[in-house]
Image (cartoon, rainbow, N blue to C red):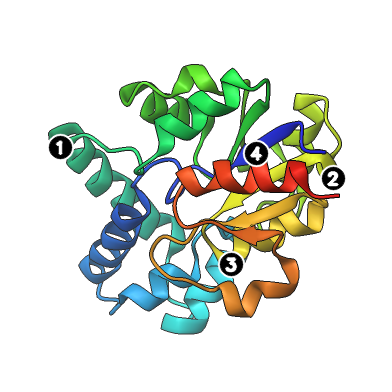
Amino acid sequence: MIYGVISDMDGVILDTEKLYVRFWCEAARHYGFPMEREHALAIRSLARPYAIERLRGFFGESFDYDTVRNKRVELMDAYVAANGIAPKDGAAELLEYLKANGYRVALATATPVDRAKDYLARVGLLRYFDEVISARMVKNGKPAPDIYLLAAERLGISPQNCLALEDSVNGVRSASAAGCKTVLVPDLDDPREALAPLLYDTADGLTDVIRILNRKTEDP
C-alpha cells in the first residue's frame, strides 16, 4: 500500500527546470564555456561533486563550478523577481487530492529549503507539504538515495510504502535506490525506456498520478 508521496520540485511541481537549463547555459557562456541544453540536462538533480565532475568532463578542468553557479543563481533570481514562477499543470489538483485522501506528502529537492519554500509559497502550494527536504540536509545528494530515505523517515513511512515523483534520470535513480515506488513524470525529456527497470509507472502529467494511485490501490 502507498501511504506517502515524495516529489521532486523542479520540473515536477514547479515549471522551473527549463529556467535552470536556460540560466546554466547563459551563466556558463558568460564565462566562455559553450554550454548547450544537453549539458544542462545532464546535471539535472545531480549532487554538486558529481555535477562538477560531469561539467569538467564537458569543458575541461578550468570550469569553475561555483563561479558559474553563482552567476546562474543571479540570473535566475532576477528573472523570477521580474516574471514570477509557475506550477506545473495539475500540481494543485494532485496535491489537493493527496491531502483529501490522507496521503503524507514530502518534497525532496536539490534546491535549498528556504528557496524551495519561497517558490512553493509564491504559487500557493507550500501548505500541501508535510516535509520539505533539501539535498543540503543529507550527506550525499541525488543519485544517492539519502534524500528519499530522509524524506520517508520524516514522514514516518517506509520507503516501500512511498510513491516518488521524478522527472530526471538522476532523480529516478535516487528514489529507486531508496526503495520507493518511483513514477516518472516527464518534463524536458522522456527517458522512460532507459529507466524502465527502475520505474513503478510513468505518468502523463501530474493528474495522471491520481490514476496510478487508484489503479495500484486496486491491484490484487
Residue at the disc numbered 4: 6
- Kind of residue at disc 1: Asn
Residue at coordinates 49% horizontally, 41% vertically from top-left?
111
Q: Secondary structure at mark 4?
A: strand
| Left or right of residue 220: residue 26 | left
Residue depicted at 58% across the width and 67% down the height: 169
Q: Nearer the viewer, residue 11 or 81?
A: 11
Judged left or right of residue 142, residue 25 is left
The disc at residue 169 is 3
Label 3, label 2: how far apart the Cα atoms are = 20 Å
* Mark 3 or 2, nearer chain start: 2
Mark 4 crowd level (few <14, some 14–19, many ≥20, 10 Å Cα): many
- What amino acid is at disc 2? Gln
Q: Quarter of the image for the N terminus: give it.
A: top right
Q: Position of residue 72 (x, y in %)?
A: 31, 53
In three-dimensional space, the C-alpha distance between marks 2 and 4, rounded to whole angstroms, equals 12 Å
The residues tagged by marks 1 and 4 sit, at their Cα atoms, a distance apart of: 28 Å
Question: Label 2 to label 1, Cα distance in Å?
Answer: 39 Å
Which of the two marks, 2 or 1, is nearer to us in this view? 2
**Which of the two discs, 1 and 4, labels the residue nearer the N terminus?**
4
Q: Earlier in the sequence, mark 2 or mark 1?
A: 1
**Considering the numbered disc 3 on the image, is that residue within a helix, a strand or a loop?**
helix
Is tag 1's residue or tag 3's residue first in the polypeptide sequence? 1
